[in-house]
Amino acid sequence: MNDGASENQASIDDLCVNTIRTLAMDAVQKANSGHPGAPMGLAPAAYVLWTRVLKHNPKNPAWLDRDRFVLSAGHASMLLYSLLFLTGYELSLDELKNFRQWGSKTPGHPEFGHTPGVETTTGPLGQGFANAVGMAMAERHLAATFNRPGHEIVDHYTYMICGDGDMMEGVSSESASLAGHLGLSKLICLYDDNKITIDGSTAISFTEDVAKRFTSYNWHVLKVKDGNDCQAILSALASAKAETDKPSLIIISTHIACGSPNKQDTSDAHGSPLGEEEIRLTKKNLGWPEDASFLVPEQALSKFRKCIETGNQAESAWQDIYHAYTKKYPDLADKWVNAMSGFLPEGWDAGIPEYLPSDNPVETRVASGKILNAIAEKVPSLIGGSADLEPSNKTFIKGSHEFQKNAYDGRNIRFGIREHAMGGILSGMLLHHGLRPYGGTFLVFSDYMRPSIRAACLMKLPVIYIFTHDSIAVGEDGPTHQPIEHLAALRAIPGLTVIRPADAAETAEAWRQAMKTTDGPVALILSRQKLPILDRSEGDSVKMLSNGAYIVSDSKGTPDIIFIATGSEVSIAVEAKKILFSKGISARVISMPSWELFEKTSIGYKKNILPQTAKNRLSVEAGTPLGWERYTGNSEHIIGISGFGASAPGGTVMKKFGFTAENIAQKAMDVIKKSRKEK
């Protein structure tokens, strides 16, 4: 390129970069809310990535072989919205003007499913990082499974932009460690190293050597000293793409609020508008019309909109590859379509074992492992693992091998002791498309996963969580490993379906329900101790689990009391019913494995299960009593645990905390006696 051409390119680059900067400034100012500084500093890197490197088609955001882009630093949302508008996605300039307002497609932080082109919901720092790792893992698995020499239908990169906040959050460390171990070379992270957080300079709290840290994680690390040098950024991206053994981290030294005379390199530009006067000064400094608002120069828009043409060409070329693939590998192509559609194949649950009352007692975690394997035989897209607890969680697919570096077709993922990362990675794998991921750990460690679970609920992702060791019956490990408040905490998350099966038969139905759920995640809560297979001859079919609650054992006529129990406590309630029967007291036992499913049923069904005339109700669950009054109608009619557990054999702990048939029967008689007195 001659000097004149170089100067012209530099001029166009500046124009495009400043278009992004001024759109971000103007939108945040109009909303009087937001983060202008990061978009202004990141504008050159984002411009180069989106117009010269990223493989994407603005007219088809769902194109399967597109590169994925994750803005982990979600507070810089105006950077992404500007790029989406400028490159031609279905996002208008008016939507940018409506930033952060009710009903707009430009919410404060990017939301998946809400704005065209947004790959994941980001905002809680580090979540996007974990999602990106999951997307890169999904790409490698699908490529290893479906690609054939000369017919690579899966061949794309995952790019993310993160900031200092992402780097400080532990979830990014967990995720980066696993990504380096797995050698995810098609994962490229651009790190916005502007050295500013809300509190001020990162020097007050964050002085580690990030480059050395990521080198130790087995990442390929590059540095760009000037975040405004488009050519240096392009060269770094080319080097990152050329790396075939490791994921890449590009550390870009940027200036927050670049161009602002008074707020550049200060925390003032992090989480609040620059102010009208400072915006005028900044535009003047950038050579921009000072009083122009939401100005998009035609020359800049033309440059950005070339992404439409290049995107259509890229997708068309892929379509040719895919067409040839279907001709040469028709069976694989059919499997590809099945995976991408997400539909369950006919007979997918035919191999699930049936459990009968005559069978020996079995841990629901063990039953879950057998059920998982039966489903995995018929559903090749099912993939997952455990946070270093596979022997306990029973999450291994026996018909496959481990997902490891250069063995990416394996379906068994070793997440290591990284629960938080596992949660975010599972979401990323599902967001990528083509896989149905699951992950397991002890229920007590769901605390470590909660932010990731919440984000999955926000996005309505049908991830499956397998939580075992579900109560104080864990025993000798003691209160640190005995979940008390965790069921209530999970039930409090909108959109999460929590299922705590009473036995192996319910576990089978719970898995069926989980696999059929497409509008949000499901948490299966499973026991370590063996549980008897319930006799349902005096109640409803176990298939009624899909209603969230059903009658396991009933009485003739109106019962004197109704037991409502979950999990391992259902069989204890059944035994308590027998004790009451011997004393001439009738009882109904309801298994309520899922509050969420029960709340979705009809009013008529609820009244049939829990008649309004039946005031004597007693809930039985080895966890916090919080919330059960909605079903018992009385906060005193709850058998639960208000403190923590204790270290002792599981049976002893359950007995000491009152989870015995004798104690439950006595509590029931007390309830009945009191109600008769009140009458």
Image: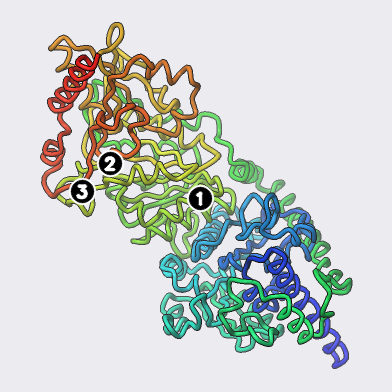
Identified by mark 1, the residue type is Ala
Side of 332 relative to 537 (left or right)? right
Q: CA distance from mark 3 to mark 2?
A: 9 Å
Q: Quadrant of residue 307?
A: bottom right
Q: CA distance from mark 1 to mark 3?
A: 29 Å
Question: With respect to residue 438, does 25 lie above or below?
Answer: below
Q: Compare marks 1 and 2 and give the one earlier in the sequence.
A: 1
Near mark 1 (Cα within 10 A), the count class, few <14, some 14-19 or many ≥20, is many
Quadrant of the rendering where the C terminus is positioned: top left
The nearer-to-camera label among 1 and 2 is 2
- Asked whether the residues under the numbered discs 1 and 3 touch, taking CB atoms below 8 Å apart as contact, a structural biologist would say no
Q: Residue 326, image x and y in percent?
A: 70, 46
Q: Is residue 111 visible?
A: yes
Q: Quadrant of residue 289?
A: bottom right
Q: Is residue 380 visible?
A: no
Q: Residue 64, image x and y in percent?
A: 67, 53
Q: Compare marks 1 and 3 and give the one earlier in the sequence.
A: 1
Q: Which residue is mark 1?
A: 456
Q: Residue at x 60, y 43 (%)?
A: 335
Q: CA distance from mark 1 to mark 2?
A: 25 Å
Q: Nearer the viewer, residue 508 or 275?
A: 275
- Callout 2: SS: loop
Q: Which residue is mark 2?
A: 624
Identified by mark 3, the residue type is Phe
The nearer-to-camera label among 1 and 3 is 3
Q: Nearer the viewer, residue 200 or 203?
A: 200
Determine the residue located farthest toward the top in the rendered image.
557
- Asked whether the residues under the numbered discs 3 and 2 touch, taking CB atoms below 8 Å apart as contact, a structural biologist would say no
Near mark 2 (Cα within 10 A), the count class, few <14, some 14-19 or many ≥20, is many
Q: Which residue is mark 3?
A: 644
Q: Quadrant of residue 570?
A: top left
